[in-house]
Image: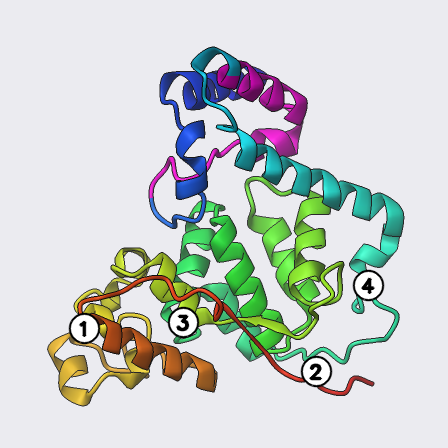
Amino acid sequence: GESSALAHLHSYIWEKNLAKSYKQTRNSLTGCENSTKFSPWLANGSLSPRKICVELKKYENEQGAADAGYWIIFELLWRDFFKFTALKYGARLFYGRGLKSNPYDWKHDLQQFEAWRTGTTGVPFVDANMREFMNTGWMSNRGRQNVASFLTKDLSIDWRYGAVWFESILIDHDVCSNYGNWVYVAGIGNDPRENRHFNMIKQAFDYDSSGEFVRTWCPELARLPNEYIHTPWLAPSHILKDAAVELGVNYPRPIIVVPQWNQQSQNWRTSLQNQHHTQQRGIDFYFKKPEKRH
């Protein structure tokens, strides 16, 4: 309730001074304090965005920490944006075509959806996020964007399947934010780049370069070396054997492999060999010509 919300707000901003590092930690996949965790209380009305903003501005003024709360307020503005989107479009937020005029011929492959839902797609980065979600009711913002892109862009499955599953599990579910984000990522919302796909392997190597997150939630892959932790299907047979991984037996074969993923994996292995890895900006996404819809 409100007492717990205010206690957490005070602890996060004043006792632990975490607002200053939010920009650096907000995309982290592991750790309890990598994000604010305000969203459950915001969702149930125990905490207001105005109260958060007031505390952040007070902190900035008293601590001389200019813009310490900028990125947190930025995320709150996204929350407001989706609320105004819902007010503007109403029931269209739940249409299969989303906010677009043309209908989308989504697939309804229940077998693939079940693999996505249960974290058994054979794509470790997706599986780890979905397993964390199913066991905790929580997923990082980075994870939510990636698994939504995978379901709607790589598998072309009706985005509403994913949105309803999120609604049933999320401990911070907010109708406007959930459905607004889903239509946005699915390319039928406010983002004009409707054919934008998250490069799942690029994202995995950038945000889980050590493989810690995947090893936590996909322990059957724990013994794989870093260069293959996100693409076990590319690992030589002796590497798989040494790691006690048998694809199709104790870890599924991938239900889909996108060419850009394998190229990204090769780039990663090359960077490891050269002992020089930096986030390669500019290839977080790839674009495909939209399929004709009926």
- Callout 4–callout 2 Cβ contact below 8 Å: no
- Amino acid identity at mark 1: Asn
Q: Which residues are magenta?
A: 31-60
How far, Cα to Cα, is label 3 from label 4?
30 Å
The residue wearing badge 2 is 290
The residue that label 3 is drawn on is 201
Q: Which residue is mark 1?
A: 274
Contact flag, marks 3 and 1 (Cβ < 8 Å): no
Q: Earlier in the sequence, mark 3 or mark 4?
A: 4
Secondary structure under the numbered disc 3 in the rendered image? helix
Say whether residue 228 is left or right of residue 62. Answer: left
Q: Is residue 34 shown in magenta? A: yes
Q: Residue at label 4?
A: 95
Which residue is found at the position 11% from the left and 78% from the top? 242
Question: In screen coordinates, is 225 left or right of 187?
Answer: left
Distance from disc 4 to disc 2, alpha carbons, whole Å, reads: 19 Å
Q: Which of pointers 4 and 1 lies earlier in the amino acid sequence?
A: 4
Question: Which amino acid lies under the numbered mark 2 shown in the image of this protein?
Answer: Pro
Of the pair 245 and 213, the residue shown nearer to us: 213
Q: Is residue 145 above or below residue 116?
A: above
